[in-house]
Amino acid sequence: MTFLASIPIIHSVQGLIFRCAACGREYPVETPRWNCACGGPFELSGTPPFSRAGIDPREWSLWRYRASLPIEEEVSLGEGLTPLIPLELFGLGVHFKLEFLMPTGSFKDRGTAVLVSFLKQQAIREVVEDSSGNAAASLAAYCARAGIKARIFVPSYASPAKLQQIEVYGAELVPIPGSRADAARAAEAAAKAGSYYASHYWNPFVLEGLKTFAYELAEQLDWHAPENLIFPSGHGTFLLGAYLGFHELAQAGVISRLPQLFAAQAAACAPLAEGFRLGLPGPAEITPGETVAEGIRIVWPVRGPQVLRAIRESGGGAVTVSDSETVEAQRELARHGLYVESTSAVAVAALKKLIEQGVIKPGELTVVPLTGSGLKSR
Ligand SMILES: *Cc1c(COP(=O)(O)O)cnc(C)c1O
Ligand SMILES: [Zn+2]
């Protein structure tokens, strides 16, 4: 993209601000902080709006929406523009968006591409992250592409296939005995000691990248939003990023209403679904059990209140499924030729439940993003 890179910069980092989602306090985006002094997560303000006229039709990646992204120079591995395919499943026509066909095998690449582009712009040389799988593999790959050193704190139970993937990109793996939360604390401690914490759930540049899911889907549907969307949700970042994208499409007058957004969670660890069911403003406090859906075994979703607000505003909901329902859905989908990891199959099991409950009806346009490849799960 040498031609485009030579066009003068229109929006600069100066226009962007980190704003705390909890208390509204503002910070320059150059801050080394990953959250507000009050503990709240940052949102990014001052980002360019969605513009259909700004689409670059010659770009076959999510960077065709470059004009709507707060980035001057991209770090890319060709992410985005995933296929949308119709299937007949559980007696109904459903569309699946094949997000597992990304450079590192999961939708996480949308957010990581934009986050690492920002980090490179900021001349950051070294980052830390905590994740048991796809987020870390994605960060390791994009850091390799950008020449940034990545150190990843992983809980010792992480899937061997994912650990191997993280390592092959050249990232430094630091196994942490204990839980996912222990790995997060180790990353936060390293950040206090001076490393940049490139967290896929704390850093709001990730949400900017995830907005492109909404842009892309609307473009594939001839500039319409579907009626229903079901996300396998851990932190709920994917759902929230999509919500923000659809919100911008509505503001730009491209769509007239939001899709109903559904969060699908494993029954053994469902703080968002519990919070939704109980009518709480944020996630419920839960004691997690074991689940095959390791990628969404998140006890405390840091953007929980924002996620629940997005679900409620869209008229959607939250669904829990058992591991046996998840495994059955994973097999059923594979019988149609699509092999996803069990975490992703949680949304497919939720789809079945929503159809049986009559929440999702025949004739409605329903889309399920398939978030991660079956090839790297156990
Ligand atoms: C990370 C991940 C999710 C959950 O995404 P959140 O943004 O945490 O809700 C779902 N599926 C797969 C395969 C993932 O890697
Ligand atoms: Zn705050």
Image: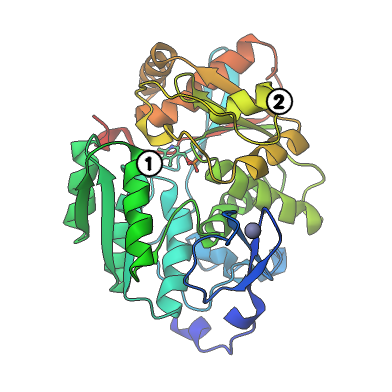
Q: In what element is the residue under mark 1? A: helix
Under mark 2, the amino acid is Glu
- Sort mark 1 into few (<14), some (14-19) or many (20+) by Cα contacts within 10 Å: some
- Residue 265 in percent (x, y) is at 51, 26
Mark 2 residue element: loop
Instruction: Give the x, y percent position of residue 163.
Output: 21, 45
Mark 1 highlights which residue? 181
Q: Residues within 10 Å of mark 2 (few under 14, many from 20)?
A: few
Q: Mark 2 or mark 1, which is nearer the start of the sequence?
A: 1
Of tags 1 and 2, the one toward the viewer is: 1
Q: Describe residue 159's horizontal placement relative to residue 304 as left or right.
A: left
* Residue extending furthest toward the top: 356
- Side of 174 relative to 312 (left or right): left
Above/below status of 305 relative to 92: below
Task: Tell me which image quadrant ligand 1 sits in.
Answer: top left
> Is ligand 1 within 8 Å of the beta carbon of the residue shown at mark 2?
no
Q: Position of residue 136 (x, y in %)?
A: 32, 51
Instruction: Give the percent coordinates (x, y) of residue 213.
Output: 56, 49
- State how the image is colored: rainbow
**Amino acid found under the numbered disc labelled 1:** Ala
Q: Is residue 340 visible?
A: no
The residue at the point 76 percent across, 31 percent down is 315
Q: Which residue is mark 2?
A: 364
